[in-house]
Amino acid sequence: MADQVIFGLHAVHSLLQYNGKLVVELQVADQRRDSRLAEIVALAENSGIAVRQVSREVLDSGSSGARHQGVLALCKQSPSYHEKDLPYLLDAVETAPLLLILDGVTDPHNLGACLRSADAAGVHAVIAPKDKAAGLNATVRKVACGAAEHVPFFQVTNLARTLRLLQARGIWLVGAAGEAQSTLHQADLKGPLGLVMGSEGKGMRRLTREHCDLLVNIPMHGSVSSLNVSVATGVCLFEAVRQRHA
C-alpha cells in the first residue's frame, strides 16, 4: 500500500537510484517517449518494480495538479530521522560537521531549494522543527531534484534542546540575521558548524537567536534589504565551503 507520492523526473530518478525499495509502483505517461523517461522505466524494471502506463489525467490527479513531467512513483513512507538519531550521525562524521538548521521554513519550495543547496555544499544533515515548518512532501522532493534522498533531514520536537545538544558536542552555531553587527565574511566558518537560518519573513525566533554563538549578516549592496531564505542559505553555505577549502 502506497503512503506517499513522488513525482518529477529528477526526484523519481534519484528515488529509484538510491532508495528504490520504497517504490511500490511507477506510473508513466502513455503518450511520452524519450530517453530520460526510458532510463527511469529501466531502473524500475531492473529493480522488479511494477511499471504502469497511464493517461496524463491520472498523473494530474495523482500529483494534485502539480507539474509531474510524465512520471509518478507510489511509495511507502520513507524512514525519518529524529533527535535521538543525531548523536549517531555526528559520531560517524569523519570531518568537521557542517549542519544546516532551519527555524520554521514553511514554504515547500524554499525547503526543497535549501535541501538542494545543502547537498551541493556537502552538508551532513539538515535540522528543522516538527511543528509550524514544512516537511518532506512531494513538492519538496521535486524542487530538491534528488537532494532529499541524499541529505539526512531531521525533524525535532524541541529545536532549542537540539541546539544545546549540538553546542555540547562542540558545534559552533552561527545564525543569519539582518541586524547582526558582524558580516558573514568576517566569521570563522571552518570548524564544526551549525548554520542557523530563520523562517520566511520573521527570521529566527527569539529562543533560537539566543542559542546562537554568533550572529552574522549578509552584506547587501543594492536596493533590497533582504534575500529569500533559500538564496540566503546558499550564500552562507558556500561561504563556509569557500573557507573550508581555502
Image (cartoon, rainbow, N blue to C red):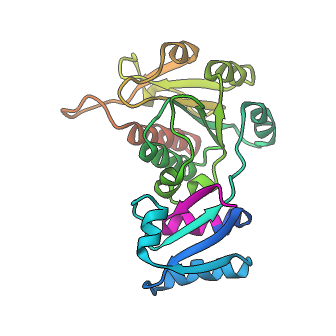
Q: Residue at x 51, y 33 (%)?
A: 133
Pinpoint residue 201: horizontal percent, then vertical percent: 35, 27
Report which quarter residue 168 is drawn in: top right
Q: Residue at x 68, y 24 (%)?
A: 162
- Magenta highlight on residue 4: yes
Image quarter in which the C terminus is found: top right
Q: Quadrant of residue 241?
A: top right
The percent coordinates of residue 208 (x first, y second) are 54, 18
Towards the viewer: 167 or 4? 4
On the picture, is 233 further left or further right than 23?
left
Q: Is residue 111 magenta?
A: no
Q: Is residue 169 above or below residue 122?
A: above
Q: Is residue 126 left or right of residue 170?
A: left
Image x and y of residue 102, in percent: 53, 32
Q: Quadrant of residue 124?
A: top right
Q: Position of residue 151 (x, y in %)?
A: 63, 49
Quarter of the image containing the N terminus?
bottom right
Say which residue appears at 51% left-offset and 16% top-offset.
209
* In the foreground, 154 or 100: 154
Q: Nearer the viewer, residue 165 or 46?
A: 46
- Write down the region rendered in magenta: 1-15
Position of residue 199 relative to residue 20, above or below, is: above
Query: For the point 42% across and 85% down, which residue is it?
Result: 31
